[in-house]
Each structure stands twice: as C-alpha cells, then as structure tokens.
Image (tube, rainbow, N blue to C red):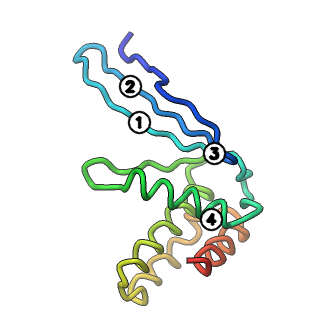
C-alpha cells in the first residue's frame, strides 16, 4: 500500500462532524495530519437554513486552523463550486473586514467570478446575508 489512513478522532457537534485524520506515505513514512469539518446541513444547490450556524462553522475553522500559504485550508463540496465558493467568499470577505481593508477595490473581482462561485442565486444571497451578521 502506498498510503495508510488512520482516523484519530471523530466528534459530531450539532450540524458538523469533525475528523482528525493521519495520512502516512508508506515509502517515506512522511505523515500529514488533517482536520476535516463536514458540515452536513447544506444541501447541494441550496443553502443552510440558518446563516448563523454556517458562520459559527466558518469562524471555528478560521480560529482553529487559520489558512497559511505553507499549509492552506482546502474547501470542497461535491462539485467544487457553489458551497465551496460561498464558503471561501464569505471567509475572504470576513478577513478583509477584520483587517479593515478598503473592499471597494476587491469587490469587482468577486463580481467577475460570481458565476464560478455560486450555482444558485440562494448561495449569493446567503453570502450577502452572512456578511450582515459580521
């Protein structure tokens, strides 16, 4: 076997399953530890029923595993757009707001890529609604 995968930790908290996984590359014995947050209340092509629970998850991920260039967070849903794009856009906007950057120069870039971020208008509206809670 080229890789070995171990589940080190499993916890279900409300709408989220948290797994801590160890991935071992057998030929080199290199180990990578991964934390997976599986938010199970977000239907494909839809939105969570409550943006507050979505924001709690997003803030938990940002607090416990801040993304850095040398170890970035990876966000993925079934197709890699829609839910993933919404999560990344809201996270990016919150980071910009927390650092008090001028977002006027960044907003047009998000609008250009809107079709790649969202697969449903509801996801765009969730983004706007979520940011009003911040």
Sooner in the amino-acid sequence: mark 1 or mark 4: 1
Callouts 1 and 4 close, C-beta under 8 Å: no
Query: Residue 75, relative to residue 62: is it above or below?
Result: above
Q: Position of residue 117 (x, y in %)?
A: 56, 64
Q: Which residue is mark 4?
A: 118
Q: Which residue is mark 3?
A: 16
Q: CA distance from mark 4 to mark 3?
A: 22 Å
Badge 3 crowding class, 10 Å Cα cut-off, few under 14, some 14 to 19, many 20 or more, is some
State the quadrant of the N terminus.
Answer: top left
Residue at 52%, 34% in the rendered image = 19
Q: Nearer the viewer, mark 2 or mark 4?
A: 2
Q: Which residue is mark 2?
A: 23
Sooner in the amino-acid sequence: mark 2 or mark 4: 2
| Local secondary structure at mark 1 | strand
Task: Compare residues 96 and 27 and report the one nearer the observer.
Answer: 96
Of all residues shown, which one is farthest toward the right?
49
Q: CA distance from mark 2 to mark 3?
A: 21 Å
Q: Position of residue 114 (x, y in %)?
A: 56, 72
Badge 1 crowding class, 10 Å Cα cut-off, few under 14, some 14 to 19, many 20 or more, is some
Sooner in the amino-acid sequence: mark 1 or mark 2: 2
Q: CA distance from mark 1 to mark 4?
A: 26 Å
């Amino acid at each position: 076997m080229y890789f070995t995968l171990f589940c080190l930790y499993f916890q279900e908290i409300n709408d989220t399953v948290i797994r801590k996984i160890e991935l071992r590359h057998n030929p080199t014995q290199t180990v990578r530890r991964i934390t997976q947050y599986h938010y199970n209340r977000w239907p494909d092509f839809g939105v969570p029923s409550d943006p507050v629970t979505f924001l709690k998850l997003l803030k938990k991920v940002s607090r416990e595993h801040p993304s850095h260039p040398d170890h970035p967070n990876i966000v993925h849903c079934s197709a890699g757009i829609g839910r993933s794009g919404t999560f990344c856009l809201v996270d990016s906007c919150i980071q910009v707001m927390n650092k008090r950057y001028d977002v006027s120069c960044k907003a047009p870039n998000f609008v250009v890529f809107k079709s790649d971020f969202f697969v449903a208008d509801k996801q765009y509206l969730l983004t706007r609604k979520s940011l009003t809670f911040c």
